[in-house]
Image (cartoon, grey):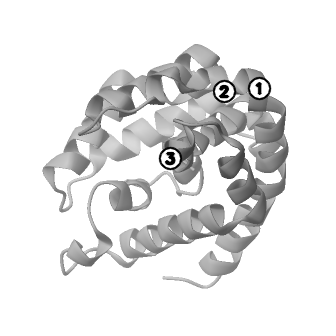
Amino acid sequence: MNYLAHLYFSELTPDSCVGQLLPDCMPPKQLPEGVSDELRHHVDLHLTIDRLTDSHPAVQALRRSLPPPYRRFGGVILDVFFDHCLARNWSQWSAQPLPEFAEGVYTALAAYNGPENERLKMLRTALVQRRWLPGYATREGMARALESLDRRSRFRTPLAEAPVLLDSHGHQVDQVFADLFPALRAAVNSQTRGTY
């Protein structure tokens, strides 16, 4: 899951939103002392979401079905494709409209004033300034996300060309997401019960 899906599991507070983003920007072991229990909990949720997604048999099979050179980057590509699935079917998963949810995320991220490294600060600032979360609902917006990941990569990747995979794998991506996302919601609900 990419940014939108992780933020879906936040509580639209500064610490929960940052906690859902932080593991993509900083090794959790480098988390400074004194961060809130809420932030630490959402870091743990992020890691649970990633672990369950990566180990899901249907996700693994889908990744293996991607042709070279995409297969090597299948985890990143599928994370963005799954955000696309979530955004396209947002009303199935949330009563709050996606643009309204996104504004809540931007407000929370702008209000955050806790510890962060440069990478997290850049991501937080980019999300607030560029307001790209609802764009995941369109193929063009999803393609921009993949192009951005490609630009930030230290080496050459096929990420910018990856949207073409939806022509051959789109139905399979939708089916895997429909199986995976309820399992993630159940796991997050179980892990959240009675915390902090």
The disc placed on residue 55 is none
Between residue 54 and residue 140, name the one nearer to us. Answer: 54
Between residue 1 and residue 189, name the one nearer to us. Answer: 1
Q: Residue at x 36, y 55 (%)?
A: 24
- Foreground disc of the pair 2, 3: 3
Q: Earlier in the sequence, mark 2 or mark 3?
A: 3
Q: Residue 149 location, x and y as percent?
A: 37, 34
Which residue is identified by label 1? 168
The disc placed on residue 165 is 2
The type of residue carrying mark 3 is Arg
Q: Residue at x 36, y 30 (%)?
A: 150
The type of residue carrying mark 1 is Ser
Kindly report the distance in space between the C-alpha atoms of the residues bearing marks 2 and 3.
14 Å
Q: Residue at x 65, y 68 (%)?
A: 55
Determine the image quadrant of residue 185.
bottom right
Which residue is identified by label 3? 72
93 is higher (above) or lower (below) than 14: above
180 is higher (above) or lower (below) than 40: above
